[in-house]
Amino acid sequence: MPRYNSAVVLGATATGKTAFAVKLAHAKHGEIISADSRQVYRGLDLGTGKDLHEYGSIPYHLIDVCDLNREFTVFHFQQEVYRIFPQLTEKGVLPIIAGGTGLYLDAILRGYELIPVPENPALREALAAKTLQELQAMLIALKPDIHNKTDLEQPDRLVRAIEIARYRQEHPESAVEHLHTTPLIRPKIYGISFERSVLRDRIRRRLIARIDAGMIEETERLHAQGYSWERLESLGLEYRFTAQYLQGKIETKEAYIEQLYRAIGQFAKRQETWFRRMAKNGIKIEWIDGNEAAQLTAEKIAGSELFGSLEELKF
């Protein structure tokens, strides 16, 4: 049995993950599964940096698969990866999971036991009268090792998380059924990184390029299509700050750009922290300098000693 049957390319925002994954796909006959929690949505193009032209002839998955009036969660992502992965391996294609959404990557790499859970109207009615602090205490009691801390800040997510935790307690057999549908995923994991000041410069230049390409107009157009400002603000930093600017909550374009730039930089730090925590949890990541990754071609990847371990990526 080969040591690896797939690859993962991860890194903070603006590190060139897609470009590297595409080169890897050309070198090893692969297809790319996007691990980006926002690129799944149709219509979120400039603000999420889809850059579909980068893929060229390489097939990709989990981009533009969901409308904005629906929620796409880590559960949906995991289920879709479990569906797509064996389809690729069965036809001799290397699955390459590429993206920067740490929770999504962790759900695959550490095999979160995420199961389909029906709504519980009686429980929801009982929880409706609870304060945010009471809901937080209930969830922490049910799940002391909770993965997604954002659940603790939003009442609707808290209620859903409590609903799921209660269901798992009452239906332990559901976790066993989950294991039967989980494909064996053994990835070689590559991380792309830049020195902090270089990354900040890349973030700023990319942000300006997206604004010049029409990111503000894209957000305005989505609102005109009927999506509320509240919904748009829930779709990540670019849409949150752009929606606030369009509503007049941020007075000048210069202030909007500066505030968004700083927020993206802080987000990149949080991504790096998440990846360090993954490493501490036993996930082995081979880090590659972003400048070196940018200079590589598919041919160099196929023949480089740096990627000698890729010879183990066979079926």
Image: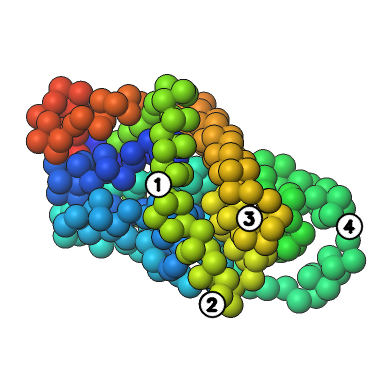
Q: Residue at position x 73%, y 63% from top? A: 156
Q: Is residue 304 rendered to the left or right of residue 51?
A: left
Q: CA distance from mark 3 to mark 2?
A: 18 Å
Q: Amino acid at mark 2?
A: Gln
Structural crowding at the residue carrying mark 2, measured as other residues with C-alpha within 10 Å and reported as few (<14), some (14–19) or many (≥20): few
- Ranked by sequence position, the earlier of labels 3 and 2 is 2
Q: CA distance from mark 4 to mark 2?
A: 34 Å
Q: CA distance from mark 4 to mark 3?
A: 31 Å
Against 173, residue 3 (above or below) is above
Q: CA distance from mark 3 to mark 1?
A: 18 Å
Find numbered disc 1 in the image and state the secondary structure of the residue it sits on: helix
Q: Amino acid at mark 1?
A: Ala
Reading the image, the residue beneath label 2 is 225
Q: Amino acid at mark 3?
A: Tyr
* Coordinates of residue 176 in the picture (x, y in percent): 51, 58
Find numbered disc 2 in the image and state the secondary structure of the residue it sits on: loop
* Coordinates of residue 144 in the picture (x, y in percent): 72, 42
Q: Is residue 309 rendered to the left or right of residue 156?
A: left
Reading the image, the residue beneath label 4 is 131
Find numbered disc 3 in the image and state the secondary structure of the residue it sits on: helix
